């Protein structure tokens, strides 16, 4: 292997190890709604797809890895090695009545590798966040002349490690599949104090640890309508599958609350009400069936226009609560390149991207659906004499309840990702 490629590989391995630890540990949300279900589902797109409304089921590209449809990666250059990694700065503004809060953080989003096995078969592997919990807020309840003040805290992440394979059948049809390992821990704790001086403090701590394998599949069909123009139809499918892991429920009353998810301090009196722990399998917790459809119009190295639709059947899964709702997601995205082969005009080689999306989330509160919609735009900045690219994207959106509730979340995200494209498998005449 060429010396330059060895140094690149060493750098890639170091970044992969460090980012894997980071993806699993960072706080990715501050929303009180992340206490429900599996937390806040993470919407992560590789390469430049995040700037196109997270649209990509029917997109193909030889410049980067597509995590939105495993079949798309059959279009990767068979002589190249791909490395893709991204990080974001995000903020959340939470508004409920007269109460407002603002949070922000910088997180490492994902890391992925891709390479060809044969001229028609490609492999990808990577880490990305699956869902996150992260909140800390207080509720006050009045009943029977007694006031209850509850402090609610949540934390944790579920992370997805995956291996994907894609294969090109003939010149137009591509298929692909991912095997995914979802792992991590989610914790939720409630600590209540009562105005009645004779009442003890009350607390509840739930902990869910996941370690489970699942699968998803994809296909794309390309229709050539001119020498440089095409339509691509894409589809993805994830069957309903069970999750395996361990769970713990601890409910108690006592004198002094603890910290760091210790329900009570061991120095005071504690009366255990409930303590249960054990393993669970797919009969108790599941992830839903998911269907995605996409359509794109493409002018080679000039224009991409795409539309995606996704449906997730959350109401059909086993879960401990009944507030889950089926979701639908619509997105549109576009990429424009003024002149890809311009030698002396760098601005003409930049990829200009924009998009938008709408989704009703899988959590419903008091009969009100949670809507999520936003706009995106960004740039793909190519490096000189290379298909390697730095992608910049900006996303702004809002989540709100559909009924009379005045609860809203405004959020934004600035993302930078690096798509490395190296010709590693071509034979060199001179070294």
Image (spheres, rainbow, N blue to C red):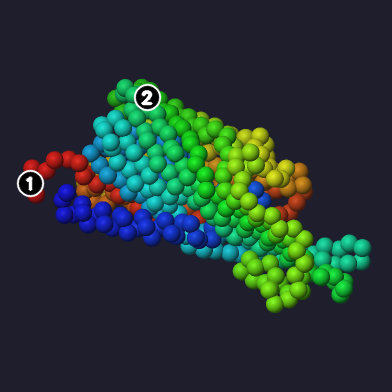
22 vs 226: above or below: below
Image coordinates for residue 282, horizontal then vertical, percent: 60, 39
Which residue corresponds to the image point at 35% horizontal and 30% vertical from the top-left? 167
Query: What SS does tag 1 mark?
Result: loop
187 vs 389: above or below: below
Image coordinates for residue 147, horizontal then vertical, percent: 85, 67
Task: Quote the CA–CA distance across marks 2 and 1.
Answer: 37 Å
Query: What SS does tag 2 mark?
Result: strand
Dot 2 and dot 1 residues touching (CB under 8 Å)? no
Q: Which residue is mark 2?
A: 173
- CA neighbours of label 2 inside 10 A, class few (<14), some (14 to 19), many (20+): some
Image quadrant assignment for residue 94: bottom right
> Considering only order in the chain, which callout, 1 or 2, is on the residue closer to the N terminus?
2
23 sits to left or right of 425? right
Q: Which residue is mark 1?
A: 430
62 vs 388: above or below: above
Image coordinates for residue 253, horizontal then vertical, percent: 77, 67
Q: Nearer the viewer, residue 278 or 321?
A: 278
- CA neighbours of label 1 inside 10 A, class few (<14), some (14 to 19), many (20+): few
Which residue corresponds to the image point at 73% horizontal and 48% vertical from the top-left? 365
Name of the residue lying farthest toward the left: 430
Image coordinates for residue 412, horizontal then vertical, percent: 54, 56
Q: Which mark is residue 64?
A: none
Q: Nearer the viewer, residue 246 or 112?
A: 246
Which residue corresponds to the image point at 73% horizontal and 76% vertical from the top-left? 268
């Amino acid at each position: 292997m060429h010396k330059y490629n060895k140094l690149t590989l060493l750098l890639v391995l170091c970044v992969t190890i460090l980012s894997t630890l980071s993806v699993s540990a960072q706080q990715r949300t501050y929303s009180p709604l992340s206490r429900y279900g599996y937390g806040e589902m993470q919407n992560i797109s590789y390469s430049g797809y995040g700037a196109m409304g997270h649209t990509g089921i029917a997109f193909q590209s030889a410049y980067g890895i597509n995590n939105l449809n495993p079949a798309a990666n059959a279009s990767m250059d068979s002589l190249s090695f791909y490395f893709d990694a991204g990080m974001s700065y995000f903020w959340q503004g939470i508004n409920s009545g007269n109460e407002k809060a603002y949070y922000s953080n910088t997180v490492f989003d994902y890391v992925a590798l891709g390479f060809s096995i044969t001229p028609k078969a490609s492999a990808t592997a990577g880490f990305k966040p699956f869902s996150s919990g992260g909140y800390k807020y207080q509720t006050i309840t009045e009943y029977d002349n007694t006031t209850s003040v509850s402090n609610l805290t949540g934390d944790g992440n579920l992370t997805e490690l995956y291996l994907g394979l894609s294969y090109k059948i003939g010149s137009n049809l591509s298929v692909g599949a991912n095997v995914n390992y979802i792992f991590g821990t989610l914790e939720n704790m409630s600590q209540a104090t009562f105005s009645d001086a004779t009442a003890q403090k009350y607390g509840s701590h739930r902990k869910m640890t996941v370690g489970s394998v699942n699968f998803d599949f994809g296909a794309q069909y390309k229709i050539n309508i001119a020498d440089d123009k095409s339509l691509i139809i894409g589809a993805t499918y994830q069957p309903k599958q069970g999750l395996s892991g361990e769970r713990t429920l601890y409910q108690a009353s006592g004198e002094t609350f603890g910290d760091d998810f210790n329900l009570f301090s061991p120095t005071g009196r504690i009366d255990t009400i409930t303590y249960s722990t054990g393993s669970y399998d797919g009969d108790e917790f599941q992830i839903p069936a998911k269907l995605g459809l996409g359509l794109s119009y493409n002018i080679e190295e000039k224009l991409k226009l795409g539309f995606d639709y996704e449906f997730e059947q959350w109401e059909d899964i086993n879960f401990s609560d009944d507030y889950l709702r089926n979701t639908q997601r619509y997105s549109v995205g576009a990429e424009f390149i003024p002149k890809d082969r311009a030698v002396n005009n760098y601005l003409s080689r930049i990829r200009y991207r924009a998009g938008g999306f709408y989704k009703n989330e899988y959590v419903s509160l008091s009969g009100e659906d949670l809507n999520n919609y936003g706009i995106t735009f960004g740039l793909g900045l190519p490096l000189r004499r290379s298909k390697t690219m730095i992608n910049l994207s900006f996303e702004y959106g809002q989540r709100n309840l559909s009924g009379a509730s005045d609860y809203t979340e405004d959020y934004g995200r600035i993302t930078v990702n690096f798509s490395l494209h190296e010709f590693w498998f071509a034979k060199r005449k001179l070294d």
